[in-house]
Amino acid sequence: MALPFSNTAGRTLERLRNAFVDTARGAREVVGAPLRPDLPDDDIPRLKNRIDACLEGKGGETARRGRAAELGQAYLSLSPAGRKKFLLTLAHDYGLPREAALAKVERWRATKEPPRALVKTLEPPAVRLLREFVGVPQGVKFVVDLRAELLALGRSDAAARTLSEDLRPLLGAWFDVAFLDLVRIDWNAPAALLEKLVAYEAVHAIRSWRDIKNRLDSDRRCFAFFHPRMPNEPLIFVEVALVNGLAGNVQRLLDAKAETSDPQGANTAIFYSISNCQQGLAGISFGNFLIKRVAEKLAHDLPNIRDFATLSPIPGLRRHIDDRLKTEGDAALTPGEIASLVPVTDEAAGAAAMRMLLDRPSWWDVPAIDKALRPILTRMAARFLTTTDEKGRALDRVAHFHLGNGAIVERINWLADTSTNGLKQSYAMMVNYRYKLGDVDANHEAYAAGKVVASREVRAQAKG
Amino acid sequence: MALPFSNTAGRTLERLRNAFVDTARGAREVVGAPLRPDLPDDDIPRLKNRIDACLEGKGGETARRGRAAELGQAYLSLSPAGRKKFLLTLAHDYGLPREAALAKVERWRATKEPPRALVKTLEPPAVRLLREFVGVPQGVKFVVDLRAELLALGRSDAAARTLSEDLRPLLGAWFDVAFLDLVRIDWNAPAALLEKLVAYEAVHAIRSWRDIKNRLDSDRRCFAFFHPRMPNEPLIFVEVALVNGLAGNVQRLLDAKAETSDPQGANTAIFYSISNCQQGLAGISFGNFLIKRVAEKLAHDLPNIRDFATLSPIPGLRRHIDDRLKTEGDAALTPGEIASLVPVTDEAAGAAAMRMLLDRPSWWDVPAIDKALRPILTRMAARFLTTTDEKGRALDRVAHFHLGNGAIVERINWLADTSTNGLKQSYAMMVNYRYKLGDVDANHEAYAAGKVVASREVRAQAKG
Amino acid sequence: MALPFSNTAGRTLERLRNAFVDTARGAREVVGAPLRPDLPDDDIPRLKNRIDACLEGKGGETARRGRAAELGQAYLSLSPAGRKKFLLTLAHDYGLPREAALAKVERWRATKEPPRALVKTLEPPAVRLLREFVGVPQGVKFVVDLRAELLALGRSDAAARTLSEDLRPLLGAWFDVAFLDLVRIDWNAPAALLEKLVAYEAVHAIRSWRDIKNRLDSDRRCFAFFHPRMPNEPLIFVEVALVNGLAGNVQRLLDAKAETSDPQGANTAIFYSISNCQQGLAGISFGNFLIKRVAEKLAHDLPNIRDFATLSPIPGLRRHIDDRLKTEGDAALTPGEIASLVPVTDEAAGAAAMRMLLDRPSWWDVPAIDKALRPILTRMAARFLTTTDEKGRALDRVAHFHLGNGAIVERINWLADTSTNGLKQSYAMMVNYRYKLGDVDANHEAYAAGKVVASREVRAQAKG
Amino acid sequence: MALPFSNTAGRTLERLRNAFVDTARGAREVVGAPLRPDLPDDDIPRLKNRIDACLEGKGGETARRGRAAELGQAYLSLSPAGRKKFLLTLAHDYGLPREAALAKVERWRATKEPPRALVKTLEPPAVRLLREFVGVPQGVKFVVDLRAELLALGRSDAAARTLSEDLRPLLGAWFDVAFLDLVRIDWNAPAALLEKLVAYEAVHAIRSWRDIKNRLDSDRRCFAFFHPRMPNEPLIFVEVALVNGLAGNVQRLLDAKAETSDPQGANTAIFYSISNCQQGLAGISFGNFLIKRVAEKLAHDLPNIRDFATLSPIPGLRRHIDDRLKTEGDAALTPGEIASLVPVTDEAAGAAAMRMLLDRPSWWDVPAIDKALRPILTRMAARFLTTTDEKGRALDRVAHFHLGNGAIVERINWLADTSTNGLKQSYAMMVNYRYKLGDVDANHEAYAAGKVVASREVRAQAKG
């Protein structure tokens, strides 16, 4: 066998390589000179020779796997520019264009082979190669990260985009939720893991070790999915606060100085942050399973917890409001709303007045402004969250995620996040999506039919 | 969500079910009355309703997974007859016949969709369903065992055979060798696991705990592959003896009373038994990887081990010899061989004499007979092992496996296994296949081209 | 530091030894030539030099520990005869005789030192040395086994007996029950551990792997105490059957072919075997803690279990009955009993008749004999079990153990163990001791005051 | 059994308590009303009743253990003031004064009992009780912390001091180094553990997570001893830097921004911080074993590491120098030194000049001052470190520790720690103690005889 074919550590491979000198010599003939870091154009033919050798599969399965692993290692030794060229070569020269597929279809039609034979021929060679790359040490993470690079390249290159899509079913099979471990993360977790949570947290940035310790306290829960072959890499994680009643203010939740409460006394689990960690797994959904399995687990471990809800940002709201004020002007407001703004400012009226008020720093600290804006913004938020576009999709991406999971729009929270980010996203409003476990299927179906389910209160607010 | 959707234990599921009564009630409407154990014909429509509901996927991914898990549980509660009907229904009514595939091809051709869109439509509904069954507790093992049942049904039912084949790529992705753990098994292994080895051992039956303890002694090694989601189920295991020189007698290796030798003093690793454990994984090869990874590991751990070989049965040999004697008569022997038989018996001559001698109990205990038969049988064995059929395949299935892995036919061992089984398979002969690590690729390629590589000695024996 | 002083594996020690040649050379000067396996008299002075060097403690604590470890290793390389001489030298020449202790008392009295200073001087040098032996790899087990050898020697040598007693407080501190792990052993336990259970089982011999598997089935429990530094060595284990009502026949419990019952349906835990594993820990009690912690655990895990009792042998009973018949003759029986024997045999009368009946093989198979003997033997058993000797101790050692733990004599079981051993010990009778958790303290105190607590039934039987 | 007697969690105990109501009621009679938090004088008799009940031991071993555990729990529910009263009661009323010991000696002398019988009677009742406290959940840590409180009380109370001393042998047996685990701590350690290291670090305070991450980097090592029954509590830990040549500046070592170097290229292990974690284990030495076992481990794992040394503070040096300048004046300096100071300042001369220079902030930044002071301070440091007091003890406590372990004074480092603390302790000087593995025994013995071993360089510096 020409090349190492297992996951054992580099040093062992080295020894084996020395032990079987003839092998190594033979292998080197195939491999040729090593690829240069930037993969200059001269090296491309040699790269393609190696890819071809991998696909040809001489020497049997173990040899093929070994050869692919060596090529994977070669990729790892390239510079960023070299890696990009490697992937583009793969995407452009080893994909399966429609015409090629049509030819394969014709060939199959001429045989008596079953459909699965056709399916087999329709696997693009690039996918066939990348599938073998899992044989590199840490190979699962390696393939996931390759796909992340392809997705990035795919923003400007169609072939890369196609390859990243072609890889999805393979990763979907590998990362079937049934293979994942649901792990609780607390303050006894490895520091190296907590450091990753800090890096991956996508909703409310973790500012310090004190902050993260607070989020892992006894009145909090943090759960993540892990793949057995990526033991140090969370795939997705969710942060939960155990509280009494629906939480309506995220600063209070994140206040590391606040007292820890007794989880046995809480009746509500608030999912206040959920972050995907692996860009290379985009399009493979875990979030719905995570939320529901965590809800199950909490229901089992803490029988006093009866309600499950989120405290979620509304990332598209401010833009929506600003756009409407700009493009529709006073038509964006009801007559009553326009009237209600009069006593607050005499510098402008209607939409212009509202614009002016909203541009004023810390406007909410002025009781009169707060009082005037609250019903208007709340109405706009409620309407925004309960409206779907022509495809039946919620306007806000976070809303789309939770509604698709069967949650409902439960409550809009005024001044729930007055951080810079909160203001920028949604004029400081946040929303609770509630997961009522008995209703999620029906809610999902309703949403699939284009209908957003919301609480009576939110429905009333949307009407104004 | 209508149904439980996770791997948590049954009791929790039960509790959750009670907690969300409405849900359960809703679910029951879909599910209907439970299927009766033997699945009488009246129940088939209800079964198909449930399968359809699973495939339709209402309520989103988590609901779909939960519904499939419930159906999987229902399958588990059936009698053997009921299970058979369940699987045949699936195979016959939820496959993808060629015509249906052709229609899908046409539909795709009419769009501008990429090939992967076609591939997606070509997945048979039955496979789509069984893929979801992994959500049952112990789901991976469940799907593997389902495929084993399909393979058994497939012997008499073409649709079941097709479905078992259609499942192969999915299991191939799940059981990629990169996901497997190579585990050494010794006397500290759980008794429950050792009991399984006893059950799965397919080459030399394990007769007692003393026997298995001997096979796990300090001068032995036993390695198995495990899947992280089937932690208590070996996929395949190999038994190795650490000895000096090529071992040529299996009774001596298996003698539990023989003294244990110092593994540090051995120079050769003899793979004397390799057994697949999961019938449901037929067609997904691990053996080649197992042998080579174990060889690597031994080379690393015990630098004194320089040679790697098997001591293998020749299961097809006796039948081959008997057939040749019967159909070819004296033509099966050389003139010299015919002459050599004369002094041994005067009751018959040539092939008939040989037949008579071989039918005599314990013929090898008679020195004259032993002396006469040895060169003839050895020649026939050597020729048998080095000949290929019209497709270029070795005549013996064990030979085919090792030659395909890049081993060579090294040595034929006379009176190597005088057990009843050894006599029945191969007139007590066994063979060493040698794995010379530097040559396995070239050997594999030679064999792929129809040529069996053998040692000079065996080649000479084959010539007679 | 002259000598290795840690638990790291032998090979590392070897390397270190070579690395620090000067050290080793220095050490060898102290150590001198190695002790010969049988420790001939010529070697004794060299042994004593080494012991003295250990006790002197040059080079500080780590050097002392290292030196003791080397001496411990030297002990391990001796023959059985050599080990015996080693231990006797230690016991005779490094103990602390009373006169030496008196002298130390006088010296202390002359100072103003606190009592702990006196205590320190009263530690025998041999104990001081053996305490250091814990530094040998597997040192805890090593010291325990040394004490077992001392106890054996102590049967014929008073100094060895004294040393074994002097070691007890040290082992008592090391093996405080708070340091032990209570571990459930089931069929997933390592085969090597189960093999030890087979070896250590002291009550009902384990005859086969099938037998042990039966004892670890789902309607059984087996628990053991382990010390964290002897992870592969149980200290004591108990076997429990989960049944309905008091079990009265041990053959039925041990029948490997009997059906396994559902532990959730059981209401009684029967402790049918408890075995100490480490002879070197004689005199350090775990049994009482084991029984009560297992009872606690079962009460917690299986709320349906309400009663806890043993099914125990009565090892001293047959001897007691035979003695009484022999020495007291007819006086051992009541007139009614004597009369009841008349119809059964006419070959003899009274005690002689009884003797004759009991000597008849399988006497219990003859209904008339069974009927005649049952009340007499039961009465004698009841009286035997409820009587104490002049020191207030139960006559039977198993009774003493359970009564001391606070159990009561609950029920005598006729024909409960008709195995050879059961007949030999107690004419096939066994007894249930019941642990009523609320009463054990009071029962213990009653027994401490010389009073055996028994059930109303047993008390009635004892009266005849 | 009246009271819970095991380590199982509180909730289980609670359940059991409710289950066996009679028991609990009985127990409460003994226990009486709960002790009030501050343990007012009225409660003392009830406390003593409970202590007496524990010591009396009614109900047998398990009952005694249970009763002690309840008393331990009662202690935990007291206020700081109450705990103090509890411990003082124990120390004053349950110790063993000399007179009581003398009486026991007399009683023993009148018997024929062996010395161990006397030893047994000399155990103070308080120790007998505290030994049982190990039965509390987390009992080992509990007893250790109790001793820490006794040591603190012992500063002002002789009986508490005596009791803390009387406890030492018990803790010494429990914490024998053979029972401890040597554990490497790296960035994968639990955050909760790293937080403890931050709290326990006694030499160079850890200022941030970045700082601690740096100390656990690939060119660093951190090892700790753990007791198997205190798994989350380090007993002592050491921080090591892998460098080339002796490190002479601690700020450079602690610079979190410095580049990480390759440990394979290092030749020297610098132990730059060693901290005891458990005040309650004062007087039980681990440091010597830790240093030597870590050195062994590093020598084994990294064969390129050839030298082992510390970079240590000299906590007593500045005070020593200041005292000498103050009390001896110019006599503390040599004539050459006095002369060398003249060119630097004309405001004062001799000792007064030196005092003035040393009081100037950042004096070392002025090249002339640095040049003048360096030889004088170095000489004084060398002399300080190589001198012993009348008892043959080094003047500096850190020197005493390392010399006692067999290290030598290798090199004095100028401006090695210019932090506030470094200046305050030792005018920024630090010292390397070198552990030459082959010499440590001889060095230990030399130091035991009152002689400090130092390098030629330091000896020369000491002479001036």
Image (cartoon, coloured by chain):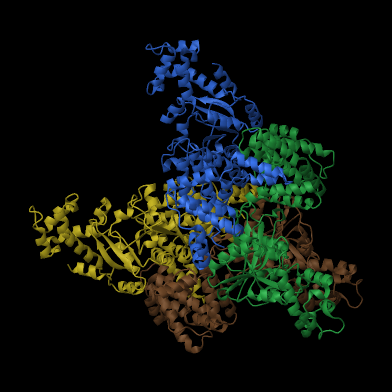
Chain colours: A green, B blue, C yellow, D brown
Horizontal placement of A147 versus D52: left or right? right
Q: At which x and y percent is residue A155? A: 79, 53
Apparent side of residue B146 relative to residue C419 in the rendered image (left or right): right
Q: Position of residue C199 (x, y in %)?
A: 39, 50
Q: Relative to C352, does residue D24 appear above or below in the rendering? A: below
Quadrant of image for the C terminus of chain D: bottom right
Does D349 sit left or right of D224 as displayed?
right
Q: Going 65% across and 67% down the picture, which residue do you hit?
A: A239
Q: Nearer the viewer, residue D364 or C156?
A: D364
Instruction: Please tell me which residue lies in front, D187 or A69.
Output: A69
Which quadrant of the structure image shows residue B53? bottom right
From this viewpoint, is residue B278 visible?
no
Instruction: Give percent across and percent down for residue A402.
Output: 66, 65
Depth check: give the residue in front, B102 or A16: B102
Which quadrant, please, contains the N terminus of chain D?
bottom left
Query: Can residue C368 be seen from the camera position used here?
Result: yes
Q: Quadrant of residue B298?
A: top right
Residue B363 coordinates in the image, percent (x, y): 40, 21
